[in-house]
Amino acid sequence: MIIVMLGAPGTGKGTVGNLLSREFNIPHISSGEIFRSYIKKDEKLGKKIEEYVSVGALVPDELTIEILKARFEEDDTVNGFVLDGFPRTIKQAEYLDELLKKEDKKINVVVDLSLSDDEIVDRITKRRTCPNPDCREIYNLDFKRPKVDGICDRCGSKLIIREDDNEETIRKRLLNYHNISEGLINYYKEKDILYTVKLNNESNRVSSDVAIEIKDYLNKIKNV
Ligand code: AMP
């Protein structure tokens, strides 16, 4: 099963991606997470990546592809994966298609989570993240509060506010997202594998409902 999650930062694609990864027992590959771990551990490459991530700019395609390529070669990807944050450009999408073609695989669905910019800013500034790489649970102070303030329900780690989760950086990331997403959405629309989920903050639709909707859709297309 190969699932690509699209959607601006803050639409819940990380949470939905995590749920789908557990449901299908495939790894959740988040390019943002991979970059953040490089920033933490890899002196030289990490510094280079940080120059882009810290200002909300896209990491150049060549570097992104090089880093993701190494991740796709790991053993746990044999039965597929949920991609979150990659591809972000047509060049990255074309690279992914080529890679999958070589292995006689294809993307099952590209999920587009759609939410207005103002609602996204509201959501992200209230987002709290578990920094534990084996957990990575995401909370929201409005609609998914942890049971104990500031502490992850699942693993007990102290929750953090991601460095790039501030309004200025979010607006920049949204601008980036809109600049590139239209092309990417059309790219997958033309391939007839795009599935759009329209969200709004009022409906209070939690990520688990969205994940169930996607799972049902995948079961449906499998039976067609
Ligand atoms: P995310 O956690 O997906 O919001 O990503 C955080 C940051 O990592 C982004 O704002 C970009 O700077 C960088 N990034 C993540 N994925 C990509 C990608 N596929 N291509 C380029 N830059 C990326």
Image (spheres, helix red, strand yellow):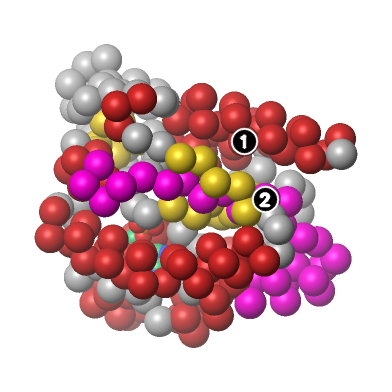
SS of the residue at dot 2?
A: strand
Report the amino acid beneath label 2: Val
Residue on which the image places disc 2: 109
Q: Nearer the viewer, residue 59 or 188?
A: 188
Residue on which the image places disc 1: 214
Q: On the picture, is 167 further left or further right than 173?
A: left
- The answer to which quarter of the image holds residue 200 is top left
Whether label 2 touches label 1, CB < 8 Å: yes
Q: On the picture, is 130 further left or further right than 214?
A: left
Q: Is 1 covered by the magenta stretch?
A: no
Residue 62 position in % (x across, y down) = 49, 84
User: Which residue lies at the image location 45% right of the left edge and 30% below the top edge?
Assistant: 207
Count residues near mark 2 (Cα–Cα under 10 Å), then give few for <14, some for 14-19, many for 20+. many
Report the amino acid beneath label 1: Ile
Q: Nearer the viewer, residue 163 or 177?
A: 177
How many numbered tags mark residues here? 2
User: Which residue lies at the image location 66% right of the left edge and 32% below the top edge?
Assistant: 215
User: Which residue lies at the image location 34% right of the left edge and 52% below the top edge?
Assistant: 9
Q: Start and end of the magenta stretch?
A: 94-119
Residue 131 position in % (x across, y down) = 31, 42
Q: Is 106 covered by the magenta stretch?
A: yes
